[in-house]
Amino acid sequence: MSVPAARAEPAVPARPGTQAGFPTPDKALGKGWRTSTDVLVTGAGDTDGYHLYLAKESNAFGWSTLATLTSSSVAVGPWTGAVCVTGSGRYAVAVFAPKKAANKPALARAGALAAVVEIATGKATHVATGVELAYFNPACGPGDRALLTRSLGDDFTQSTELLTIDAAQGRVTATRQVKGQLTTPAPAPDGDYGILGGHLVRIDDRGRATRLAQPTGQPFALQATARNGIDMVSVHGKQALAQRFRAGKLTTVATGPWDKLQLFGQRGGRNVLVGQAQMRGSVPELSVLPASRQVRAVSEAGHLVAEEVVNQQSMRSVGQPLRPADPADAGEVRVVVRAMATGTESTRTLDTTTAPKLDVALGSRPSTPAGARAANGTTGGFAPNSLTPTCAVPRNDPKVQPLQVSPDMVEWAVDQAVHGRLNVSRPANYLKAGLPAYQPQVLFPRRQMIGGGKVPAQVMLAILAQETNLSQASWHVVPGDTGNPLIASYYGNEGNLDVIDYSKTDCGYGIGQVTDGMRVGSTVFTETQRRAIAVDYAANIAAGLNILIEKWNQMAGELSQYQSYMNNNDPTWVENWFLAAWAYNSGYYPYANRDRNNGRWGVGWFNNPANPRYPANRAPFLRLTMADAERPNEWAYAERIMGWAETPQLKGFPVMSGAYAEPEYGANSPRTGPQGIRQVLSIPDRYEFCSAVNNCSEATNGCPADSELCWWHGAANSGNCLLEECAKEKLTFGSGTAEPGVKRIYERSCGTFTGDKNGNRNPNKRVSVVYSLNDTTQYNLGCADVGPSDGKFTMRWGSPAGGGTAPYAAVDTHQIGAGYKGHIWYTYVNASNPKRRVVGSWTPNLDLAPGERARYDIVAHVPSHGADFDGAEYLITRGAVLPQATCAINLALEAGWAVGGDGFPIPNPNPYDLGDDKWVYLGSYELGRGAQVQLNNVGTVTTSGFDAVAFDAMAFVPIGSNPGHSCGDDY
């Protein structure tokens, strides 16, 4: 008997910009997928912004980019965020911010942006500035009304601004101030709800809270239904409880493991529990989707769950922590999804496609209706009386160019410093910084710890990983290059390129973000010490180590009855540094100052693990996945430090290994993973820092006071260190180990340009090479034969040049040790903002007599990195009376960052092709005295990520009557 051949499954209809979700959708999704209206919206951030992605079931859950949200006013690196979909299914509401905001309590409280995105079109509207970066923000409900929070205050007093968003109108319709810390807000048909002081509350239109019920456990999810009340999920011990509030009564409707039960809102005001839920009967408008792990998003009808959404650029940054993001990696996202109809799993790597882009100008304010308070924006401009820099060591100073070191150099320095032997000899004028000869821990002797002991190396390494990604120089600089030092908020603008407010500077320098003593007028450090902190990673680590020791000593120095400490208070053990890491980020309030602090002392509330701004169902940071680093705001600072100590950053890509050693675990340290093969740290419980001292308990969902009454002091426990339940340091570099050499990402361009390769040079006149630094003795990358510049290079900022906008343009101007002999300036393309205008000019000292003219080939050096704009236009001024000319160069193609020809260049897909240094002809011209080449940054970005304009060396080769070269010819 013959068997008919199986019919081939129909191909998924192709749609522009869509990438396949399931190649065999009939089998994975069931027969009705073509007519389904189900969609899933999720997000991921990179250096281009926070991207929203859309998957429609009618397209086999193929992926497309819905919108990109960013602000070119902010120079920050990667973005992070969160997104929810309104009950109508027509709008997505997103909160997005620089990832670094998680390190700054003030920015985490009120440093994010918010936008509404129309799902049908991708049209994005900016609705608020200065909102909270928290896992529960934004909050969507059954209708098109959403809520945003802005956390006001500090460790002394807290209140919450609750912003109401009309997603259909794309604007804030009301702003209310709620007394206290409101978390997990939920818009509902009959009002707005949230958790306040451990209670479920309703917020009226004046911001007054009415207590309705007290949930069991710590709620971490709250979602309204269309007709049947409010659902919530909380953690109570080792169990998760799903509870519903309806008709004045709170009822438990389901239970599950503490870390495997989540709540999501769906279209039409229905909710869904995802995980291992044990239902207690049928519940209206509440369904269940089984899952063995936490998921990132659920589709509107529950047909698809996104288990993992990880940006490829972020994975690269984990693998190569000191290397700036590759534009080719931006927008590449790995998603793991599961079709609920059949359990079929699909893993795809997506490319972010062209989509509507919202670029928020931070000098602007979104529209606000009458009667509603404005959503705080930052106006562009100088703050009054703040025109003089307040950070002691300037940026964009050629005499201050630290080396970006390799991860093993950082580990070496820490291993030496914690033992007081970081005494490598730095010669006089190290890195051309004008310093005398010194040794790091002679310049910054290691402080003695009260009670003796030392800092475990893994604790210091973890702090450096969290604070700066192991970077001494600016994040624009790669290992092996020099450049501007990494300086936190040098201009007092928290990254807003259109604002300068020197009264609000942070002045945290280098790998350890050393802040105290780094402001103008401070006497904490000498000028030599300050400059060494800015220039030398080893000196910075020595100084930063003392800051961490000081945090330990602040607590250890209290009288015994007032001390705060972990476990047995022995600094040998990594876990015992939890409180010192807490204080490193948000400070310690000493007992001696209790009279001015309402009788309170200890560590503040912001970084308490019991704080409900962190989700109660979180696993220890990085223990389950490195993707946790995408959302650092979901963990308290000390939890992140323990995470980086337990799970080191990686180095190498795509084959990765630890950038530093794991700690040495005790025989009885906790075990996790399959068969318990992996040992981990003894992390304190979420409520370990809750007691009568700070009015904090699980019953009150943390601390209900929202003031200094929430500060904690005392003894806490996470493991018995004497019974080997704790970990201690493990050194990679022992005593006497030499400083490792830097592992360069790019080879230096040290060859000397002679013009001889030209083939038609006139030997009777000299070649003029104009460098990017007029004083070439400041080149510090180590190239030999850096001769004098035969001409002058100048930079002019602002439009008109030198006017009131000039200081702003310097904000986004950078120097790095790339290009010819190891120095370039660069900035980014901007179409029209006069505050961003930068013009570089090369004026050669041509070998010409007065009135003489001669023909020259002009050759520009294009650096291997730091220049990738595809429309750089050089202006050639030929002399006093000769006409000008132009030459357009695609810097991305010339350096190898792009491929595909001049027509439609695309980012080079080869991750190992890092670009090449290259000389490129700008053409041949008759020149006279006064000739000049200019380049500015005016333009429009046509290829995402290709927006850098570099100012490198320029050569002028006399050719006499010989044939010349054309614009764009290779040298």
Image (cartoon, helix red, strand yellow):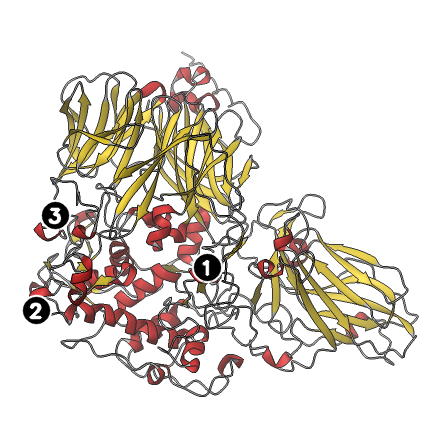
- The answer to whether residue 289 is above or below residue 927 is above
Q: Position of residue 830 (x, y in %)?
A: 63, 50
Q: Any mark on residue 560, and which?
A: 2
Quadrant position of the N terminus in the picture: top left
Mark sitting earlier along the chain (1/2): 1
Q: Could you tell me which secondary element the residue under label 3 belongs to?
A: loop
Say whether residue 262 is visible.
no
Q: Position of residue 445 (x, y in %)?
A: 30, 82
* 423 sits to left or right of 587: right
Q: Which residue is mark 1?
A: 492
- The answer to whether residue 140 is above or below residue 452 is above
Q: Position of residue 644 (x, y in %)?
A: 29, 58
Quadrant position of the C terminus in the picture: bottom right
Q: Which residue is mark 3?
A: 695
* 388 sits to left or right of 467: right
Task: Please name the residue shown 46% across and 32% down the image.
Answer: 116
The amino acid sitting under disc 1 is Gly
* C-alpha distance separating marks 3 and 2: 22 Å
* 637 sits to left or right of 894: left
The amino acid sitting under disc 2 is Ser
The amino acid sitting under disc 3 is Asn
Q: Position of residue 426 (x, y in %)?
A: 43, 84
Task: Please name the residue shown 43% across and 17% down the image.
Answer: 36
- Occupied quadrant, residue 857: bottom right
Foreground residue, 440 or 707?
707
